[in-house]
Image: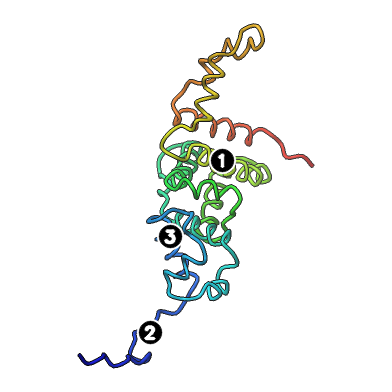
Amino acid sequence: MTAAAPRSRRDRPAKPALSREGIVAAAVAILRAEGLRKVTMRRLAQELDTGPASLYVYVRNTDELHAAVLDELLGTMEAVPAEGTWRERLEHVLTAYTRVLLAHPSLARSALTAWPSGPHYLDLIETLLALLDEGGVPRERAAWGVDLLLQHATATAAEHAGDEPSADWQALRGALRGASAETHPHIAAGSDVLLSGAPEARASWAFQALINGIEHTAVPD
C-alpha cells in the first residue's frame, strides 16, 4: 500500500482572520451549546483553531468575554412597544432584559460582576433614560435610577435562574411557615403573605415600586 503524500500547508484552506466580532460569535455559540462554564479562552481557542494568546489581542480576559457575550445577547431583546404608558413600556424593557438573563442562568450570575460596554448595552441604557425622561423624571434621578433598575433586574434573574427551587429556598419557606408566634410574631402573622404571589406579579410590583421611588426621591447634593 502506497503511503499518502504529505499535504503542503499551502494546500489547506486558510483560517478566517480573527476579529472581536468573530470571537464573540463563537463564544455565544459555545454558551448556547455547552453553557457559560465552557466559555473560556482555552475552549474558544480550540473552537477557532488558534492559540489562547491570540485571543487576548481582542479580549482582555474571561470577564470581558462574558460581558461581550451578554451584550451580544441583548441584541435579541424584544423591541419597545409603541403602545402603553411610559411606565408600562419601561417595565416591558426591564422584563425583556430579565428574560434574556433567565434564559442563560450561569450568565445571569456572571452579569452581577461583568459589566457590558458594547452597543446593545448602551442602547438599553439610552432606552431606559428616554422612557424616564418621557415620564418627567429629573435627569439626575434617572441617571442613578437606571443603575438601580438594572441591578435589581440582574439580581432577580440570578436569584431565580434554574428550573427548580433550591434546597436553601425550600428550607427558608419551611422556616417561615414554622416560625413561632411567641418569638417571631410578625413572621408568624404574615408568613402566607411573605410567600404569596406569582414570580411575574412580584417582579412587576418590584419594578413599579422602584420606578415610583426613583421618580420621587431626590438625589443628594
Amino acid at dot 3 = Val
Q: Quadrant of residue 184?
A: top right
Kindly identify the residue that appears in the image at 49 percent across and 54 percent down.
Answer: 37
Residues at marks 2 and 1, CA–CA distance in whole angstroms: 44 Å
Q: Given contact means CB atoms under 8 Å apart, are the residues at marks 2 and 1 in contact? A: no
Please give the label number shown on residue 28. 3
Q: Is residue 181 left or right of residue 93?
A: right
Amino acid at dot 1 = Ala
As drawn, the residue found furthest toward the front would be: 1
Kindly identify the residue that appears in the image at 43 percent across and 72 percent down.
Answer: 48
Point out the tag, 3 or 1, that comes first from the N-terminus: 3
Q: Residue 86's x, y, as percent?
A: 50, 39
- Of circles 2 and 1, the one toward us is 2
Residue identifier under label 1 = 155
Please give the label number shown on residue 53. none
Q: Where, quadrant-wise, is the C terminus in this rendering?
A: top right
Point out the tag, 2 or 3, that comes first from the N-terminus: 2
Closer to the camera in the image, 197 or 204: 197
As drawn, the residue found furthest toward the left would be: 1
